[in-house]
Image (tube, grey):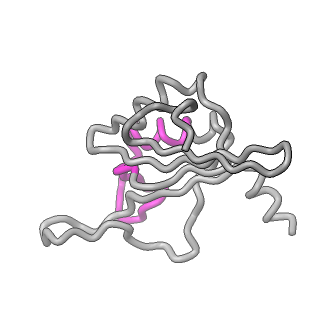
Amino acid sequence: MRHDLIEYWDIFVLSLFQGNSTYNLMNVYSDDDNTVILYLRDHIDELPLFQYMSSDFNVHSKVWDSNVTHHRWAAITLLEIAADLNLEWTQPSNPGPTFISHNEDLCPSVIDLMFHQISDSARSRTN
């Protein structure tokens, strides 16, 4: 666990080491007020690069959920943060809702997301 990289209650950073290489992985929970997204935006210049970022972002967007018709500021900001960290959204191989509420008034939605290093994506396309 790397509290020296990010000290924030809803962000968990794990670093893996292999030889001289360090692989940083980030798991987050962002509440309905998008506090983690705002925190990452405000501290982006202090962060190392990550190979992976995922979890519950609580962000709706037509980019990752075909049932959503909008792409609001939080989704745009999240994608900008990912790009600044050299990450891109990972389209799941089994698309569909990641949140299904017990409250029947709430529609199923996609709010759990995963981002991976851009170079990994480019490498997989050429193989």
List the single residue furthest toward the bottom.
94
Q: Position of residue 67 (x, y in %)?
A: 35, 65
Instruction: Quadrant for residue 4, please give it.
Output: top right
Residue that appears at 79% across and 56% down: 122
Q: Which residues are magenta?
A: 57-81
Q: Nearer the viewer, residue 55 or 111?
A: 55
Q: Is residue 14 above or below residue 105?
A: above
All told, the count of numbered labels is 0
* Quadrant housing the C terminus: bottom right
Residue that appears at 39% across and 54% down: 56
Q: Nearer the viewer, residue 9 or 125?
A: 9
Q: Nearer the viewer, residue 95 or 112?
A: 112
Q: Position of residue 71 (x, y in %)?
A: 41, 46
* Quadrant housing the N terminus: top right
Q: Position of residue 23 (x, y in %)?
A: 71, 47
Q: Is residue 116 above or below residue 67?
A: above
Q: With 29 as the anchor, is 121 left or right in this view?
A: right
Residue that appears at 26% across and 44% down: 32
In the rendered image, residue 49 lying in the magenta stretch gets the answer: no
Instruction: Quadrant for residue 80, please give it.
Output: top right
Instruction: Quadrant for residue 44, please give it.
Output: top right
Q: Main secondary structure of the magenta part?
A: loop
Q: With 80 as the anchor, is 16 left or right in this view?
A: right
In the rendered image, residue 76 lying in the magenta stretch gets the answer: yes
Q: With 18 as the anchor, is 54 left or right in this view?
A: left
Q: With 114 as the anchor, is 97 left or right in this view?
A: left
Q: Position of residue 7 (x, y in %)?
A: 46, 31
Residue that appears at 49% across and 50% down: 27
